[in-house]
Amino acid sequence: QKTIYNYTIKTNCAHLEYYLHYPDFASSFFKGIAIAVILMFVFMAALTGSL
C-alpha cells in the first residue's frame, strides 16, 4: 500500500491532504476475507447446533 500526498501551497497558507492507496486487487481481497469469515461463523453455528 502507498500513501498519496496532495500539497496545496498558496501565498498565505499551505494545505496537505493524504490518503492510503490500496492496490486494485485489495477491494475484492477484503470482500473475499469478509465472506469467508461469515461463512465460517455460519458453518460453525450449524455444526454446533446453535442455528
Image (spheres, rainbow, N blue to C red):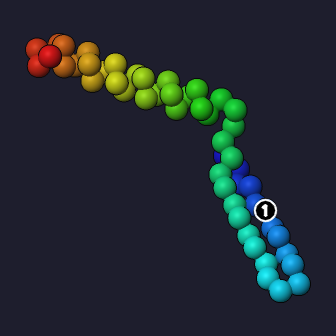
Quarter of the view holding residue 13: bottom right
The residue sitting at the right extreme is 11
- Most extreme residue toward the left, as rendered? 49
Q: Can residue 48 be seen in this view?
A: no
Q: Can residue 44 be seen in this view?
A: yes
How far across and how far down the image is residue 40, in percent? 31, 21
Amino acid identity at mark 1: Asn
Provide the secondary structure element on which disc 1 rests. Answer: strand
Residue that numbered label 1 is attached to: 6
The residue depicted at 61 percent of the width and 33 percent of the height is 26
The C terminus, quarter of image: top left
**In percent of the image, x 52 and y 32: which residue is there?**
30
Q: Is residue 43 left or right of residue 6?
A: left
Total marks shown come to 1
Would residue 34 be found to the left or right of residue 29 on screen? left
Choose between 47 and 42: the one closer to the eye.
42
At horizontal 59% and vertical 32% (from top left) the residue drawn is 27
Q: Where is residue 23 in the image (x, y as percent from the top left)?
A: 69, 37
Q: Could you say which is closer to the camera, residue 13 or residue 33?
A: 13
- In the picture, measured across the screen, residue 35 lies left or right of residue 44, that is right
Residue 2 image offset from top left, x and y in percent = 70, 50
Residue 4: name its quadrant. bottom right
Query: Looking at the picture, how far across and down is residue 11, in whole percent?
Result: 88, 84
